[in-house]
Image (cartoon, grey):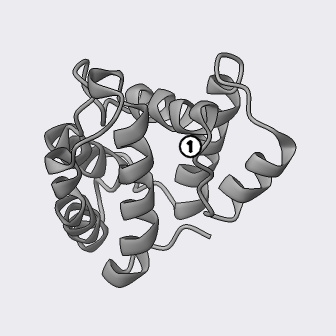
Amino acid sequence: MTSAKTDVEIKAWFLGQAVECSKDHPVTTEELRMIHKHELPDSKNAKCLMKCVFRKCNWLDSKGMYDINAAYASSTKDFSDDKTKQENANKLFDTCKSVNEENVGDGEEGCDRSLLLAKCLTKAAPQVSIYYS
């Protein structure tokens, strides 16, 4: 059994994916600063960068919808030996499942929904003891 990933390891993975995604969805230096501080810019490229990251972790399907089952699978994998973290992550994912009910302007592209998901995850994380500093 592998040990649970630390918050730092998870954040580093997400940041690495964001850097990779920025090649196709370039954002400004100011937008990068905002993302790092969990302030989410709403430019087209910033939203599509978030979509790219969510697709890399399989949390966004090909129809631009949040795949909560894939999110659950990632918490099982990332927190394999920490049931409390798994449960807290799943509570967070549950909190944000309503983003699939929102009307978005870009349909199946998924950029707009990705911004909604990122905002929800960022807002709800402290409430379920998931901390992303």
Query: How many numbered circles are shown?
Result: 1
Return the residue nearer the eye: 52 or 107: 107
Three-letter residue code for mark 1: Phe
Q: Disc 1 on helix, strand or loop?
A: helix
The relative height of residue 123 versus residue 99 in the rendered view (above or below) is below
Circle 1 packing at 10 Å, graded few (<14), some (14-19), many (20+), is some
Return the residue nearer the eye: 67 or 102: 102
Residue at left offset 28%, top offset 53%:
80
Q: Position of residue 104 (x, y in %)?
A: 29, 39
The relative height of residue 11 versus residue 47 in the rendered view (above or below) is below
| Circle 1 residue | 14
Q: Position of residue 15 (x, y in %)?
A: 65, 43
Q: Quadrant of the C terminus?
A: bottom right
Residue at left offset 52%, top offset 30%:
48
The relative height of residue 69 versus residue 94 in the rendered view (above or below) is above
The relative height of residue 75 versus residue 57 in the rendered view (above or below) is below
Q: Residue furthest front?
A: 105
